[in-house]
Image (cartoon, helix red, strand yellow):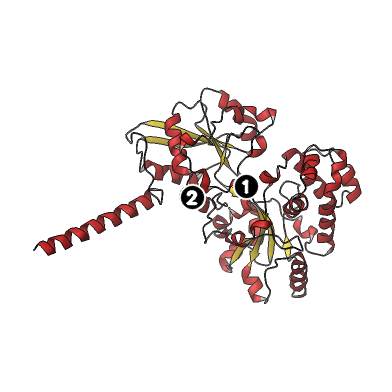
Amino acid sequence: MKKIMCMLLAVMMILCLTACGSENQESGNEEGFSPSLDTSTKCKITVAGGYDNFEALEAEFDRFNKYYPDVELAFTKVDDYNNMIGVVLDGNDAPDIYVNYSWMYGRKQYKSAIDHAEDLANSELGLDLDCIRSNIMLKTDDGTLPMVPVFANTYGMLVNNSLFEKEGLSVPTTYEEMVEVCKAFRKKGYKSPMMGFSKEETTSLFTLTAYPFFCETIADDAKAVKEFNAIKPSAGEYMRPTLEKMVQFLDDGCVDLDACAKIEDNYEAVILRFFEGDVPMMICSGDAVSGTKKRESVSEEFIENPFEYTFVSVPMSDEGVSFLDMPNLQFSVNKDSANLDMTNEFMRFLITTQELNEMAQQKGLMSPTKELPDDSMYAEFLSIPESRILSPEELGLKDDAVIQLRQAVYAVGTGEMTIDKAIDSFGSFTQ
């Protein structure tokens, strides 16, 4: 009887531990998030951003509520976010958490967005910052951390893997391979082997292909970065290799700009054109990739003829593909929050590998964590060697200078300017 009782007790203990483990995984953190505050606390925490809706974050609210059921969490959209966030933060209904961007740092018009931010590098907050790729963290002059990435971004191309398999071709990994693949597809009757948005400069196919290549050309030249950031007239010469590559890219027949001009926007129109099924490679950013799953069900062509697709880097270099690793959305904590302790508790819950990966998977964006999910749309980027990972944050490139590059590349790519004219115009381009 004693042996039977012991065995029954052992089985019950195992079942209880298994149930607890499952409950931990369902309720949030794989390692078992442990509340540090009174779980009966009642308060409201608001998060402000520019999204129309933020379902992925709201799912995190629900998971957090399993620990703190009486904490009300809400997301609020702010119209004209970039211009209005400072006004909102200075007002009476300032949010507890708000979206921030690296390019706001150091600019007078966004001073409030930085001044209101708590230093998230403070070890007393207990945030697991080590789970995030350090190369996409904002590098400030004083070593503080006013914002932390919750999503990352990169540039690349959606690839119709089913077409590649059907035609017996391999996804290119070097520039030469890409040119040959485009030629092969054209011979097989595909009019536009590569496409992308070209109507406006912002995240056009010109920027998406040229910016990673440009970063590669100056990655090991601190002097070039310094002069480029200072927008010295002579620094325009640093753009020449990139502008020459863009001309070569177009001359090699990789894209048909007339066909690309029919794409109305760089998000939904890009996705739906790709889903028509006759475009092997569609140049886009991670932001566009995030909208693919939802649009599979609204594309009649994709519903009728579904296909396998992935997102990979555009191989603009003869050296191989590169990974332009950038922060996307970042969160700041309002240091004047009336519920600062609970706000920091939510951030401690959120800034973990599991929660960030969970939210990124649901949103369809790249996770900022060091351990990307194997089943992520961005899994191909995991195989890129560390030496080929490029980070504007690490390089120290300033957004005002990058705007000059983007405008120059667009002008040359669309034929509005010669390479020499674009270089001479460095510093005079406006956004």
Q: Which mark is residue 306?
A: none
Q: Position of residue 410 (x, y in %)?
A: 80, 49
**Which circle, 2 or 1, is nearer the viewer?**
1
- Looking at the rendering, which quadrant does residue 50 occupy? top right
The disc labelled 1 sits on which kind of residue?
A: Asn
**Residue 151 visible at all:** yes
Q: What is the quadrant of the C terminus in the image?
A: top right
Q: Is 160 located above or below residue 122 in the figure?
A: below
Q: Is residue 80 visible?
A: no
Across and down, in percent, residue 131 comes to: 51, 48
Q: Identify the disc placed on residue 135.
A: 1
Of callouts 2 and 1, the N-terminal one: 1
Residue 355 vs residue 309, the one in the foreground: 355
In the image, taking residue 427 as reference, residue 152 lies left or right, namely left
Q: Which amino acid, mark 2?
A: Thr
50 above or below 382? above
In x, y percent, where is residue 339? 43, 29
Percent position of residue 293, x then y: 55, 57
Badge count: 2
Quickly name the residue at label 2: 353
- From the viewer's perspective, is 82 left or right of 31? right
Please name the residue shown 34% across and 39% down the image.
Answer: 69
Direction from residue 19 to residue 178 in the image, left or right: right
Task: Decide: is 95 above or below 287.
Answer: above
How crowded is the residue under tag 1: few (<14 C-alpha within 10 Å), some, or many (20+)?
Answer: some
Q: Horizontal placement of 207 versus 347: left or right?
A: right
Secondary structure under badge 1? Answer: helix
Q: Residues within 10 Å of mark 2 (few under 14, many from 20)?
A: many
Task: Identify the element where label 2 is drawn.
Answer: helix
